[in-house]
Image (cartoon, helix red, strand yellow):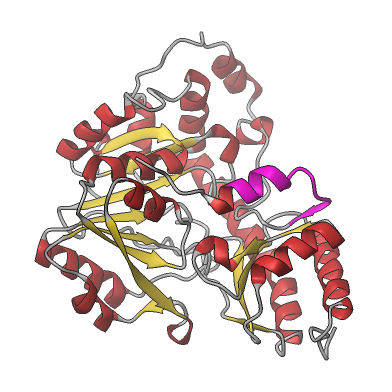
Amino acid sequence: MKIEPFELERWQSVWENKVELNISESGVHPLTTAELVPDVEQLKKILDVQQLYPQTNGSEELRTRIAELYPGAKMENVLVTSGGSEANYVSTWGLIEPGDEVLFMMPNYMQIAGLARGFGATVKSLWLRESLDWGINVDDLPRLVTAKTKIIAICNPSNPTGAVLREDMRAAILAAAEKVGAWVISDEVYRGAEFDGEMTATMWGGYERVLATAGLSKAYSLPGLRTGWVVGPAKIIEKLWSYHDYTSISPSMLTDRLASAALEPARRAWILNRTREAVRANYPALQKWLADRGDIFSHVAPKAGAIAWAGLRDGRDSAKMAEELRVQKSVLLVAGEQMGMESFVRFGFGGDQGHLQKALGRIDEYLQETQGWQSRSA
């Protein structure tokens, strides 16, 4: 088995702590432990727990609280993992055999596509279309889904576009999967970070072969807890637990307890409200900046998440732009090539507003200094 380089993860891991202005992140400013558990006595009880091995698939309390996010789910439908990345990993590993086909939404976080190819599958692209506000053309599905299709992998709300699929698009994906008996892996890690406050409908429950993956890194602003999960039929969850035995084995005891605290209903509501307030407060400045530079960037406003996807109108190399910004201006953003789509860039706007404004000012300097990229509005 040969795994291809995961360019986005390596780009961020190498450089995010070496630049002055990092706008490559896709979540809002993380919570501290004290903010997560402000009650001193409750926090003391959590911290006083012996650091034993916890139940390896997640404690009953944590799995029950996760299940509450998915209509009709019970704790038997939940496997707790080390972040959403492990959730996607064990889901893909547990389903793919050499020779299978995977239909993969693009642009996207490229983990599942890279894993599927490593496991011997053929990967086809289901393209989101800017002309459809980054939705899918449902007429693409009959052409792309075949008897060999084992998985249809989507991300909804979308990374990197911030779009949310319409109900007819979700229904078309489920119908196409059901027709050939394919599994749907729905990465829903941005569910809960919607601008309008309306929780995106989960794909769970729409069809008997759906796995919904998510975690606390994005909408819940707790990436350091490394808590993720898979929600699916009890039988497949039991199978994926055995794959989990070969990877991280279990969450940590501290992670399990803190994650349970985060998903207590009242605390969960507070965290998601904080996230939504942050994206609503931070995005307008970036939206105006992009609109004022409409001769350089195309842009469709996101509906969820702290990420904005902008196209370079002249088709220039966004990887070159990202590298030059890093070297010349100490600004880090994500090049579209790292998410399967050239000539686009992903801006993260979930951090400090002053930090974002300073980064945008540095990008203006770069545009003014780079031949042919001077914006009329800069």
Query: At x 55% / y 18%, what residue is drawn?
Result: 46
Q: Is residue 271 above or below residue 354?
A: above
Of residues 179 and 121, the one drawn nearer to the viewer in this rendering: 121
Residue 284 % position (x, y): 70, 73
Residue 374 in sight here: yes
Query: At x 54% / y 50%, what residue is drawn?
Result: 218
Residue at far front of view: 2
Q: Determine which quarter of the picture holds residue 336.
A: bottom right
Of residues 273 and 135, the one drawn nearer to the viewer in this rendering: 135
Query: At x 13% / y 63%, what residue is drawn?
Result: 178
Of residues 274 and 120, the one drawn nearer to the viewer in this rendering: 120
Residues rendered magenta in the picture: 10-22
Q: Determine which quarter of the picture holds residue 157.
A: bottom left
Residue 41 % position (x, y): 61, 19
User: The N terminus appears in which quarter of the rendering?
Assistant: top left
Of residues 133 and 373, the one drawn nearer to the viewer in this rendering: 373
